[in-house]
Image (cartoon, rainbow, N blue to C red):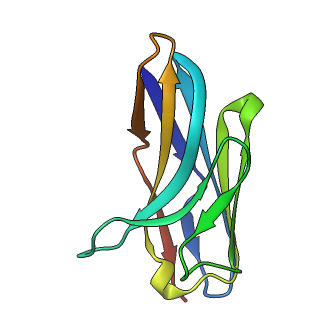
Amino acid sequence: QVQLVESGGGLVQPGGSLRLSCAASGSIFSIRTMGWYRQAPGKQRELVATIANGGSTNYADSVKGRFTISRDNAKNTVYLQMNSLKPEDTAVYYCNADVRTRDWTIRGYWGQGTQVTVSS
């Protein structure tokens, strides 16, 4: 199986920055797309950003110019640098990865989530 472990969440003031990390481990042959999603209280989970194996990226309009997604394929890790944070960025952030495991199965995996709170 595959495990995704997120870290880096916390409390930050508006205008501040945080960097989230998500490391994948387990029976991994290769990882295709990795991404970050978030879910605020009372709202549906939404896409924040994704990054393909080759490095192409996709962002939600609400975070363009403020957030940057990157990955280290050698470490099976994806990062989310969040700058100019706003109170509306407050949510639980989830890591997602499309993984081909060593038994040649492809499926998506989710992390447990990390809380990001933007408040003064």
Query: Horizontal and vertical percent for residue 72?
Result: 75, 40
Q: Residue at x 61, y 87 (%)?
A: 14
Where 18 sits versus 1, above or below?
A: below
Where 87 sits versus 91, above or below?
A: below
Q: Nearer the viewer, residue 32 or 72?
A: 32
Query: Horizontal and vertical percent for residue 99?
Result: 50, 30
Residue furthest toward the top? 103
The part of the image, by quadrant, that contains residue 47 is: bottom left
The answer to whether residue 1 is left or right of residue 43 is right
Q: Residue at x 41, y 37 (%)?
A: 109
Number of labels in the image equals: 0
Query: Horizontal and vertical percent for residue 92?
Result: 41, 63
Where 83 sits versus 2, above or below?
A: below
Q: Residue at x 55, y 64 (%)?
A: 10
Residue furthest toward the left? 42
Q: Residue at x 43, y 43 (%)?
A: 111
The part of the image, by quadrant, that contains residue 11 is: bottom right
The part of the image, by quadrant, that contains residue 56 is: bottom right
Quadrant assignment for the C terminus:
bottom right
Q: Nearer the viewer, residue 63 or 55?
A: 55
Quadrant assignment for the N terminus:
top left
Where 6 sits versus 65, above or below?
A: above
